[in-house]
Image (cartoon, coloured by chain):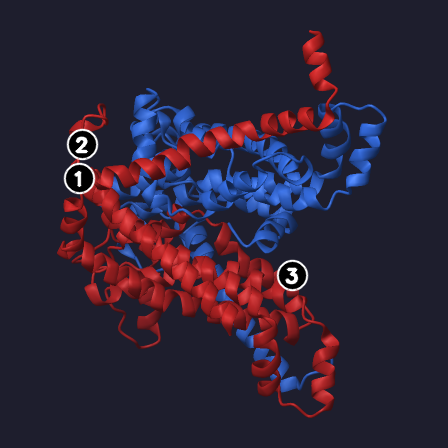
Chain colours: A red, B blue
Amino acid sequence: MSRIASWMQQPSRWRATTAWLFIAPFLTIFIVFTAVPALLALIYSFTDIGVADIRRPLDVDFVSFRTFARVLTNAGFLKSIWTTALFVVIGVPLTMAIGLVLAIGLNNGITKLRATYRAAFYLPVITNIVAAAVIWQYAFTLSGPVNSFLTSVGAAGPNWLGDPKMAMPTVIMLAVWRNVGTCMVLFLAGLQSIPVDVYEAAKIDGASAWRRFTAMTLPLLKPATLLVTVLMTVSFMNIFDEPYLLTKGGPLSSTKSVALWVYEQFGQGNIAPAMAGSYVMLAIVVILGVLQLRLLRAR
Amino acid sequence: MSKSHPVVTATLYGLLTTGAVIALLPFVWVLFGAFKSQAEIMSAPGAWLPHSFANVSNFVTLFTERMFGRYMVNSLIVSGATVVTNVLFATMAGYALAKLEFPGHKLVFGCVLAAMMVPYIALFVPQFFIIVQMGLVNSLTAVVLPIAVMPIGVFIMRQFADSVPDELLEAARLDGAGEFVIFFKIFLPLVGPAIATVAIITFLNSWNYFLWPLIVAQNQDTYTLPVGLAVASQGAKSTDYGLLLAGAIVVLLPVLILFLFLQKYFVQGIAGTGIK
């Protein structure tokens, strides 16, 4: 008792103990459900673990890099990397451009209804993806509301989700619709941190609106752009919900992202390839993240 | 802001209105479609408006013939439990990281950042194995455990706790207050807005949580609303869109109502941290 009392009288020690007590719930969940799984995934990538080993995961054989070699030469996996790259290369710039235009419009152009517009653009962000996908499927069926509208204005609507050429744009549309609001809010926060008098000075000096945009807004918006770029890239690289719910990766695997490929391998009991594939993905995410930080910081 | 040319202003309003219409169009579709019977959709699939908004048979079917009542209860339990645990644990961790000096605090903060970055696709399979080992498959506990304290909440609380002046806490220490008293009596009352933000973000994330419940809930008794809706939309041979759209409304409504009243905190959560 007295030992505890004297120990508690040392304030810094007791404070450190309190800190660890306060941290403990987070740390426990982190270790059990993030750190250990991440490590296990890496270890399993070097084994031949299958669905039969789930209950005895310690009894698996190590095969060194054979699983990685199998995954990296698997046509389905390579195609899913290509598809994911398409998602990123088309989806990220498109989402960011629309988000930026809306943010500038809201910040500089208008005085009325600002909150209403902002709420409208933000609503898709909080929308449940399963519900959104159900609506999308209904709206884009062969003779659904979208195509009936197109017919009424004299255009022939395509088979949005059934045509391998159209499925990808339709899935990307859903992802862009969902993510624009996040970009808009972040760009808006960035724009609002730029002082107004900088613009007034440039205007007096005779700088055109376009010149003010390229020479002032864009450079001053760099921190926000960096954040949005990284966020959107990670989000599109991990894209799963949209293709899973709309097309199951089809037709003809035209929308099968890496995340969906990993999920399918898991569903088929090919645990080791699923884990190796997810680590290839993790490596790409990390490399791209570091590259983006470097590039955008250097400029 | 100085006055712009009227043509520029009109163009901007036109652009923003077009954007808003596109953003809101899916909500119009779901609202119109949910009141249509299967026969109505089959006979006029392109029609926008339903015959009558008084036809609520789709909603009745969801709760009587399908198990949407059960899914709703499950979703409420999962979201309720995660909001409580996240607010409590994130506030504790955020406070410790910002205000209590201890060896290793940089490492712990590194864990918070790492947890926000790791792609979930690399984690869910081992997470499933761990839940199997714990004997928790097919339970709501298994749905809640991995998100009992989300790193984003810890991050927000730490940022916010940083802005609480040290002097306040030090003064209480000099008065002889214990560490727990300082946390509950001094710190907690000061961070109300941050707690609201964490609560909202947690509710949103857990209500919309999809991949993990899909994996770990393997029979209808443990489905949450999104899982129930997804399974319903993929199970049937001929799709009953009226019924599914009514289901979509059931999933959407609670969040939409919250958003109407607490918009500020939703937007703050994103703008303040940049992460959903």
Q: Amino acid at mark 1?
A: Asn
Q: Position of residue B63 (x, y in %)?
A: 40, 31
A256 lies above or below A47: below
Q: Secondary structure at mark 1?
A: loop
* Image point (67%, 35%), residue name: B100
Q: Secondary structure at mark 3?
A: helix
Q: Is residue B72 in view from this perspective?
A: no
- Seen from the viewer's position, the closer of residues B23 and B143 is B143
Q: Are marks 1 and 2 on the same chain?
A: yes
Q: Position of residue B184 (x, y in %)?
A: 72, 27
A69 lies above or below A168: above
Left or right of residue B219: residue A75: left
What is the total number of numbered labels drawn onto the structure image? 3
Is disc 1 in contact with disc 2, using a CB cutoff of under 8 Å? Answer: yes
Residue at which label 1 appears: A270
Left or right of residue B131: residue A270: left
Q: Earlier in the sequence, mark 1 or mark 3?
A: 3
- Seen from the viewer's position, the closer of residues B134 and A41 is A41
- Seen from the viewer's position, the closer of residues B106 and B117 is B106
Chain letter of the residue carrying label 3: A
Q: Which mark is residue A51?
A: 2
Q: Position of residue B223 (x, y in %)?
A: 36, 31
Q: Secondary structure at mark 2?
A: helix
CA gap between label 1 and label 2 equals 7 Å
Q: Residue A67 sits in which quadrant?
A: top left
- Seen from the viewer's position, the closer of residues B45 and A297 is A297
Of the residues tagged 3 and 2, which is closer to the observer? 2
CA gap between label 1 and label 3 equals 50 Å
Q: Are marks 3 and 2 on the same chain?
A: yes
Q: Earlier in the sequence, mark 1 or mark 2?
A: 2
Residue at which label 3 appears: A115
